[in-house]
Amino acid sequence: MERQVASDCRVANREHFPVLARGHISQWSDSQLLGFILQQRHSPQSSLHMANQLLQELGSLHGVLNASQNVLCSVPGVGPKKYIRCQAIVELHKRTSVQHVERMMKLDSVDESKAFFISQLQYYQHECFAVVLLNSQHEFLHYRELFTGTINSASVYPREIVKYVVDYNAANVLIGHNHPSGSPEPSQADIAMTQKIVEALGLIDVQVLDHIVVGVGNAVSLAQRGCL
């Protein structure tokens, strides 16, 4: 009886979710993955068609997951529930990255720092400034997104960063922010802002180890550029 139930479930899955019928999930195409997330219960082919349309209009999976609710819901068949599903995927990715760092306990390389800030900031449509607090051994203490701004700029107040550092008794910090335009190339304003933060934290003997500027899927380290 149990074998029959299991067999019936496998058949039902193939009928309703044809993308499950072949290959490991890592072999699915972008449209198959997106179609599964947005799947229509009684019309899987419509889900794949919707996924293809979204990818064509928004250019990539990143474009889909980064789209505002108004933009995403302008595609026929995509409503608020499907938008929330996409945002849930992004939030799961962000939380997984934070929990990985908490378990690993250290962010002591540029590559690790870049990967962490990319995971947290690349999907924002507005500029967001974030801080990672570390102890004297570069072990992870806390992460917080402190400031947000318009699509072009964010107002960053060094005194708020100092307060945050003191609250957690941090010895070192990593700072990062995103460029919604997609290019991680630092501006002169980014470099000037970094120097103000370095000076402010230097007064309480806290070191800024790096400032990571995040674009779409990539990032630039100001420490590597010699700007710290």
Image (tube, rainbow, N blue to C red):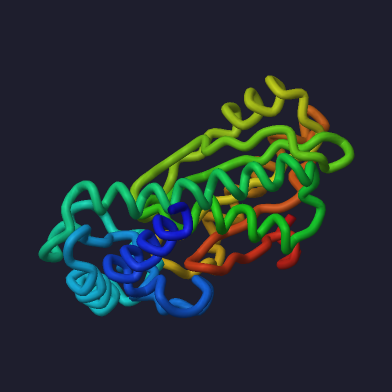
Direction right: furthest residue: 137
Residue 5: image location, x then y, percent? 40, 55
Q: Nearer the viewer, residue 197 or 23?
A: 23
Left-right relation of 95 to 195 = left
Residue extending farthest to the top is 167
* Residue found at x 68% / y 60%: 222
Q: Residue at x 17, y 71 (%)?
A: 46
* Quadrant into which the C terminus falls: bottom right
Q: As rendered, which of 203 and 143 lies closer to the eye?
A: 143
Q: In the shown orientation, is residue 52 left or right of residue 89?
A: left
Query: Residue at coordinates 30% horizontally, 68% vertically from top-left?
Result: 35
Residue 174 higher or lower than 122, as above or below: above
Is residue 117 rendered to the left or right of residue 56?
Answer: right
From what the image shows, is residue 188 above or below residue 163?
Answer: below
How many marks can you see?
0
Q: Nearer the viewer, residue 109 or 83?
A: 83
Looking at the picture, how far across and down is residue 114, in whole percent?
65, 60
Q: Residue at x 71, y 46 (%)?
A: 101
Residue 25, position as x, y percentages in the image: 50, 71
- Pinpoint residue 39: horizontal percent, then vertical percent: 27, 61
Left or right: 185 as drawn, with respect to 149:
right
Image height of 199 relative to 79, above or below: above
Q: Quadrant of residue 160?
A: top right
Q: Does 56 appear above or below 72?
A: below
Seen from the viewer's position, the closer of residues 186 and 12 is 12
